[in-house]
Amino acid sequence: MFTGIVQEIGEIKECNKTSSGKTIEVLATNSFTENLKKGASVSVNGVCLTAVSSSNGTMVFDVIKETLRITNLDDIQVGNMVNLERSLRYGDEVGGHILSGHVSCKAKSRLLQNDGEIELRIECPKEWLDFILLKGYVAINGASLTVAKKEKNSFSVFLIPETLSATNLSGLVEDSFLNIEVDQSTYSSVKVQRD
């Protein structure tokens, strides 16, 4: 479990295809990887991955083909920056909202600037857009954010300077694909109402 409060921005050091998907090596600070045991869960761009190994500020993860199909980890390359969060421990402060790290979909995005505001607009697939509620929570590349607008084929969040400096969202280019995890409580309640 995670909270959607990005703890660090890491850099992809290596990215190699394997028969089962990809192996990625991520550079972080020594303090981030301190006491990170083999088998521990780490959120990488919002995707819950299992550490194969870690030492001195580097972590290695295996990413299977199913994860690559659903997430933007299929597109990452050496030098790309990724949002990182270690798993929630009992007693930790929950600054965002509870996340599983099980990404719902990846979606195209655009950063729009207007009147000093920075809007991140996401073109979300219809099957997931129904579970995005105005003023509800959503995780974007692992960052917990509040839905500010919802339209027929998209939703938007507004980004404050702190979010831009603490995440990789400031480095987006036109039509970047972002990992979206809908709020599980919203998903469950809407699904129950439909059933």
Image: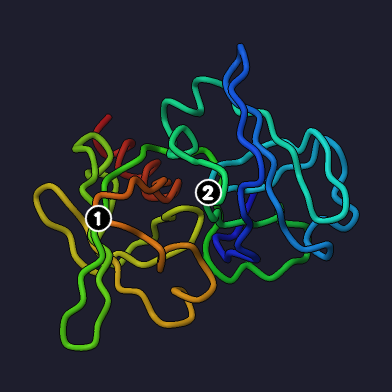
**Looking at numbered disc 1 in the image, what kind of residue is underneath it?**
Glu
- Residue type at the position of mark 2: Gly
Residues under labels 2 and 1: Cα distance?
Answer: 20 Å
- Which residue shows up at 34% across the image and 62% down it? 136
Judge left or right: residue 153 versus residue 186: left
- Taking 167 as reference, is 8 left or right? right
Residue in view at x 72 percent, y 58 percent:
28
Q: Earlier in the sequence, mark 2 or mark 1?
A: 2
Relative to 174, is 22 on the left or the right?
right
Q: Report which residue position mark 2 lands on.
A: 46
Circle 1: element type: loop
The quadrant in which residue 100 appears is: top right
Mark 2 or 1: the one toward you? 1
Residue with the mark numbered 1: 174
Is residue 41 or residue 175 the one in the foreground?
Answer: 175
Percent from the top left, x then y, of residue 91? 78, 65
Camera-side residue of 195 and 163: 163
Q: Quadrant of residue 47?
A: top right
- Residue at 66 percent across and 46 percent down: it is 13
